[in-house]
Image (cartoon, grey):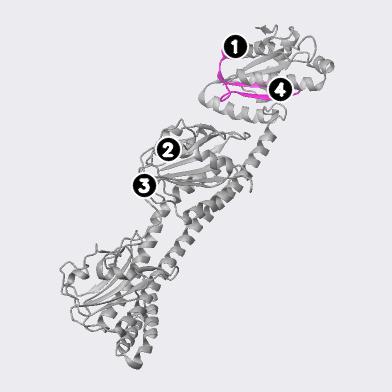
Amino acid sequence: MSVAEILFVVAGLLLGLAFQGGMFLFLIPFAVVALVLACMNRPRLAGPNSQQPPTAPIPTIFKKRSTTNNPIITPTLQNEFSNAPRGMANEPEAALKVSQVWARANADINRSMTDMLLALKIVVPHVNSVIVFTQMENQREWGIRNFANDKEISVNLRTRITETSGLLGQLFRSNVNRLLEGDLPGAKSVMYYVDNPAIKSVVAVPMIDHASGLRVGALVMDSVYPNAFNDMTANALKFIASAISMLDYKGFYSAQKHIALQQYGGLYSYLRKFFQNMSVKDIYKQIINYVKANMAYDRLTILAMDPGDDMNGSVVYCDGVDAEQFANKKFTLSDKGVFVLALMRNRPMERSFLPGFKDYLPRLNDSERKNLNLRQILVMPIAAEHGSDTAEIAICLESSSSMPYNDHEKELLKAFAGVAGFAYNRARKFELGCDQAMRDGHTGLINKKTMFEKLRSEKIRADRAKYSIGLLMMDIDHFKHVNDTYGHPIGDVVIKGIADTISKEIRSEIDVVARFGGEEFVVALIDTDADGMIETAERIRKSVEKLVFDVHQAEPLRVTVSIGAFLLTQNFNGDLEKAINNADQALYRAKEGGRNQVVQFEKQESEPVSV
């Protein structure tokens, strides 16, 4: 015999003696303690197939929603999420674990509650049924949570008790602390049976919530015998109701604590991932993965401010209903959407809409498609700097459910956002430092060292894909004269203007341009031939020739460039320094030939080829 079974026997004996009255009444508190200890020592259920009595619906934190839309993702994250399985993105994995915890806790509580009700039915003479009523979704409505009775009597599990439900409805009143009836006229007054047995006696007491002190249900005992119960029975039932209420309360908060530990453990694992990553793209990935794994939604939208821009941003990820309308959508902080407002103010936003509402609240701006089925909005901003006036990222959740996101979910998301902001700021500064080390501080172009690194990578791809790379070495003509005549500040303006012009004349997503040093620039034209290389070089030369620099004199300043070109083919056997040197030799010939021209390198260089 287990410890729990021994305690149940002891509790039953003590209750049996207590119902004898007189001096034995003092045994009731000891019986209640024995019952509670017995319930706490019950073995836990082995699994979901274990039998349990009929119960009310299991409470749940997460709300299931469905969507078959594909997520809309910014190009920088496309490879990370494009192959993800669809259809379950909005049903978080954590919800399954939470449901399992609630199911296990609910089963444990009900088994213990059933044993308590059976013990009560055994020790009290002439009892027909013992029934526990607890709150439903509507707080002013009670339903059957558990019961113990004779097998041949059918209890209607759909029974609902309200303030107007006859005899038992009186327990909703604060001035009614018990019901004791010994000669009922018929079965209709109890209302919770299918076959309407001739119930004559009823004793019932309210169940009080230990946290709020509110009435959250009732413990009811009935009999087909008249005057089956007395004041002593009613007083003893109060203790049993308190023990059942405490059992439910402790079981609920024990499960809730377990869920919280489980969820904060998951949060901790994401925090570790944050500090293992040093790229902004990885931070975006972890934010998206966490929200999808822990938050239910009908639409998830992630906004981010553009790097180095305090006013403009874009949608980097959208999943769910009408996601396609937010594909790479741009916004400014002057837009009037609720998502943008939360981002601009760095303040969480929450909105709920009643069924049938007609006034649509824009998410980004007035141009978007209106969806009145999304009735819950929760926006959690992520700021890189603590206490910042504006945020850099916003997690935007929308739901068609009538229930708002609960406080626990919001606190988890807020804690996650705080650490995500710190990690984002760290990654952004790291990338900025790396980028600054790779670039020329004046023009923003990559430097000589980075150019060689990129050129090596491109050469490997070119050899594998069987294409050529065009190398252009260019130099500003008579630049020393510009510095000597107009000063170095004007020289810097000229260099910056030419760098911008070159960048506009090449394919920014494919080709590479670098400041090689001083007034020299190098361009790598990816996947081109000799004709395409010379055509691009001529286009750059002519665009520079058209530039006009205001030097605050009668005549504006105009400059030209000389360009040397070399086609880096697949059968080129030298190293990259040799290839750059070939382009430099062609540039030297262009300078010798009169400047402001393009010359292509040839092995037999008796005369330069001038274009």
Residue 322 placement (x, y as % from top left): 40, 36
Give the Cα separation between the discs numbered 1 and 2: 54 Å
Q: Which residues are magenta?
A: 507-533
* Callout 1 amino acid: Glu
Q: Which mark is drawn over residue 496?
A: 4
Front one among 521 and 95: 95
Query: Is there any visible trace of residue 350 in the rendered image?
Result: yes
Identity of the residue drawn at 56% across and 25% down: 509
Which residue is denoted by mark 2 in the rendering?
360
Residue 106 placement (x, y as % from top left): 35, 65
| Relative side of 125 to 518, left or right | left
Q: Closer to the N terminus: mark 1 or mark 2?
A: 2
Q: Residues within 10 Å of mark 1 (few under 14, many from 20)?
A: some
Give the Cα separation between the discs numbered 3 and 2: 21 Å
Residue 437 placement (x, y as % from top left): 69, 35
**Snapshot quadrant of residue 239:** bottom left
* Callout 4 amino acid: Lys
Q: Residues within 10 Å of mark 3 (few under 14, many from 20)?
A: some
Residue 322 colored in magenta in the image: no
Identity of the residue drawn at 36% across and 82% down: 7
Q: Is residue 330 above or below residue 25?
A: above
Which residue is denoted by mark 1 in the rendering?
535
Q: Residues within 10 Å of mark 2 (few under 14, many from 20)?
A: some
Per the image, label 2 sits on a secondary structure element best described as loop
* Callout 3 amino acid: Arg
Q: Which mark is drawn over residue 65?
A: 3
| Relative side of 261 to 107, left or right | right
| Relative side of 312 to 322, left or right | right
